[in-house]
Image: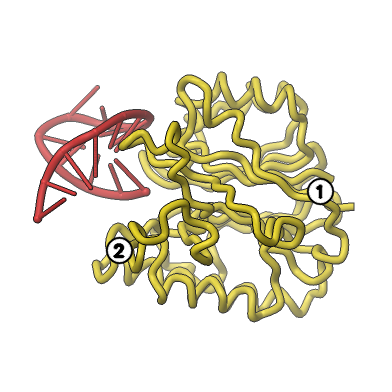
Chain colours: A yellow, B red
Amino acid sequence: MKIVTWNLNSIRARLERFTEWLAENSPDVLLLQETKCEEHAFPKEAIEDLGYNVVIHGQKTFNGVAILSKYPIEDLQCGLPTYTEDPQARYIEAVTNGVRVASVYIPNGQDVGTEKYAYKLSFLERLRQHLAHTLQYEEAFVIGGDYNIAPTDLDVADPKAWHEEILCSTAERKAFNALLNLGYRDAFRIDHPAEKIYSWWDYRSQAWPKNEGLRIDHLLLSPQATDRLEITGIDRTPRGKEKASDHAPVWCLIG
DNA sequence: ATGGTAGACGATCTA
């Protein structure tokens, strides 16, 4: 079962490229972030035509997450149960083909020390609380998303430039590690323990041609999902095309 | 300290 996480940076701006990639790669499940529209504006039919069921937690202009699956989608949950007062659409969870999956768009945080940074850290704490709770189900659970955190300097092309900057600060990395310390694993690092490869390249400053990226998109696996993990990867091909998202899809294969 | 680009939307805000 192939599961992909991808921050599309607008599903409508990306529709042609995205459906093209879907037809070529045909993953079983997609966990999408930054769809950037309300449900009525989401191009559901074009995706359903390719054989996917679609569930959406959207909002106007910003954020928005979705789950696509070739299998029926059950037990839908929009928003973190531990953060029901969050006005932003950043979390969706469901069960499909016997696997619990979630798509999460963790706040960017803007700059260290800002109000948005505080919101990011509080969102991460609410996520930690929820993931602590779901462990008791002892299910295969895959939490894919744009975490907006490069877990270590190995995940950063230019660690000096990013030292204690947003996406790389100590408090953010501690919050990410707190998720791992619950018992979840960063899927990509299981079979690529030392590879310098990234999932996001800023549109600015020619970051893509210079390969000045960061690995901030992750698939976290519960112990039961970890036991079933076969391989993972990051597909950089779509990032090099016209009208690309600034993020690349990250995938894993669960047996 | 600033600016670089992209998307939504219609002036800026978010990233």
* Nearest the eye: A154 or A235: A154
Is A209 above or below relative to A141?
Answer: above
Q: Position of residue A17 (x, y in %)?
A: 57, 22
Q: Are marks 2 and 1 on the same chain?
A: yes
Is A176 above or below relative to A230?
Answer: below
- The residue at the point 39 percent across, 38 percent down is A207
Tag 1 subunit: A
- The residue at the point 56 percent across, 78 percent down is A178
Q: Position of residue A87 (x, y in %)?
A: 39, 59
* Nearest the eye: A51 or A159: A159
Report the amino acid beneath label 2.
Lys
What residue would you read off at disc 2? A116
Q: CA distance from mark 2 to mark 1?
A: 34 Å
Mark number displayed over residue A134: none
- The residue at the point 42 percent across, 67 percent down is A85
Kindly tell me whether residue A229 is visible in this rendering.
yes
Count residues near mark 2 (Cα–Cα under 10 Å), then give few for <14, some for 14-19, many for 20+.
some
Q: Earlier in the sequence, mark 2 or mark 1?
A: 2
Is A183 above or below relative to A206?
Answer: below
